[in-house]
Image (cartoon, rainbow, N blue to C red):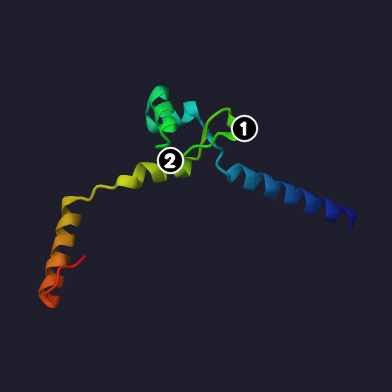
């Protein structure tokens, strides 16, 4: 019985380590500048004007969440010519059917 309890605890510890290893760690200013291919001074400017998501625990060092940075990068998506053409055709078809401009 004691061996099975020890085995269970070892397996639980291994699972906990795997979960912790898969959690993304916050990026430092230097890592973020490299990730975004920006200078540190420009990154500081973005932080100063609150143009980029960041964390500053205890008012000291800056940290960034990689998933939030990716979302920040993708915030102003530019559509391709094909996508714009499809939207235009959908609006034209809607107008012909309903007689009203689509929003």
User: Which class describes the residues within 10 Å of circle 2: few (<14), some (14-19), or many (20+)?
Assistant: some
Residue in the picture at 13% in, 64% down: 89
Label 2 belongs to which residue? 69
Q: Earlier in the sequence, mark 1 or mark 2?
A: 1
Q: Position of residue 60 (x, y in %)?
A: 58, 28
Q: Nearer the viewer, residue 31 or 102?
A: 102
- Where disc 2 sits, the SS reads helix
Label 1 belongs to which residue? 58
Picture layout, residue 47 above or below residue 95: above
- Where disc 1 sits, the SS reads helix
- Which image quarter holds the C terminus? bottom left
Q: Residue furthest front?
A: 49
> In front: mark 1 or mark 2?
1
User: Which class describes the residues within 10 Å of circle 1: few (<14), some (14-19), or many (20+)?
Assistant: few
The CA span between labels 1 and 2 is 21 Å
Q: Position of residue 46 (x, y in %)?
A: 40, 32
Residue in the picture at 12% in, 71% down: 95
């Amino acid at each position: 019985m004691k061996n099975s309890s020890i085995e269970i605890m070892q397996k639980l510890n291994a699972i906990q380590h795997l979960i912790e290893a898969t959690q993304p760690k916050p990026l430092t200013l230097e890592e973020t500048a490299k990730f975004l291919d920006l200078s540190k001074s420009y990154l500081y400017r973005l932080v100063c004007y609150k143009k980029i998501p960041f964390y500053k625990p205890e008012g000291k060092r800056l940290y960034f969440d990689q998933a939030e940075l990716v979302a920040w990068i993708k915030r102003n998506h530019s559509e391709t010519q094909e996508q714009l053409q499809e939207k235009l055709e959908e609006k034209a078809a809607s107008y012909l059917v309903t007689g009203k401009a689509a929003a």
